Image (cartoon, grey):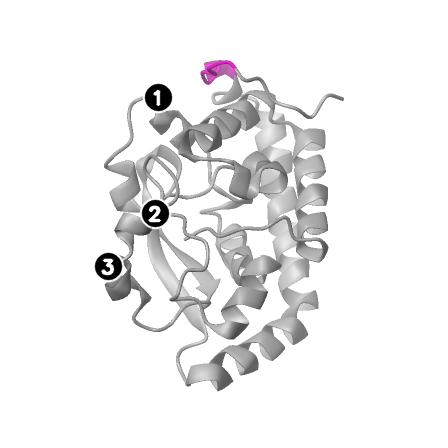
Amino acid sequence: MDMGYSSSPAYVKQSKVKGRLLYHGIKRLFDLLASLVALILLSPLFLWLAIKIHAEDGGPVFYSQIRIGKDEKPFRIYKFRSMVVNAEKLKKDLLEQNEVEGAMFKMHDDPRITKIGKFIRAHSLDELPQLWNVLIGNMSLVGPRPPLPNEVEQYTDYDKQRLLVKPGCSGLWQATSRNAADFADMVQLDIEYINRSGVFFDLWIIIKTIGVIFHPNGMYEE
């Protein structure tokens, strides 16, 4: 199977969003079982990370934030904290150093990232608490990255196509392009994923994502 993506503009096929009850049923069942098993098996890693994060600066272990999900519905996402406690306040002073165009913030060597934060981000370990979001049903293991409310405010109708499905812990752009993808590329890859979504394609992305954890390809997502 060709796992590449087209360079031409893509639009969501409505047949890929509506219906497909069997696929969506299998996907939800897999999300439920896989997230539950992963949370149990990874609990020792969670404890180790919690100790390391708290020991560095005495701040909270987890970080929560409002994101926008399917059909533009807001929900609270959870991550291991990888930045200083006042990261949101410091962000306004860094906006001019944003390294991508469009409704997204990315920056190499972000001064807000802690020492342990650099490690857990490099291996995508900061995203692990999102398994809870998957378990309760406001995220999936695979899907578009859930954007911030202020990012969605800048979306065009074309960009909003990526909000037609449930957001995911990982997706096509995270498993393949990472830093090489700007906002326009990310949107196109998300639409590409929606149009090609299926059980085997989802499994391929999950396998690629696991590979990224052990062999990082460089990620600096806000």
Closer to the chain start, of discs 2 and 1, is 2
- Residue 27 drawn above or below residue 129: above
Residue 212 horizontal/vertical position (percent): 67, 50
Residue at 25% over, 44% down: 150
Cα distance between the residues tagged 3 and 1: 30 Å
Residue 125 horizontal/vertical position (percent): 58, 62
Look at mark 2 in the image and give the residue it sits on.
Answer: 98
Residue at 54% over, 60% down: 121
- State the mark number for residue 158: 1
Closer to the chain start, of discs 3 and 1, is 3
Closer to the chain start, of discs 2 and 3, is 3
Q: What element carries label 1?
A: loop
Cα distance between the residues tagged 2 and 1: 22 Å
Q: Does the magenta segment cover residue 180?
A: no
Residue at 29% over, 31% down: 155
Q: Which mark's residue is nearer the viewer, 3 or 1? A: 3
User: Label 1 amino acid?
Assistant: Tyr
Q: Main secondary structure of the magenta part?
A: loop
Residue at 56% over, 27% down: 193
Q: What stretch is highlighted in magenta?
A: 8-15
- Tell which of 203 and 191 is nearer to you: 191
Q: Does the magenta segment cover residue 13?
A: yes
Is residue 141 something that shows in the picture? no
- Tell which of 103 and 148 is nearer to you: 103
Residue 84 position by quadrant: bottom left
User: Label 3 amino acid?
Assistant: Asp
Density class for disc 2 (Cα within 10 Å; few <14, some 14-19, many ≥20) is some
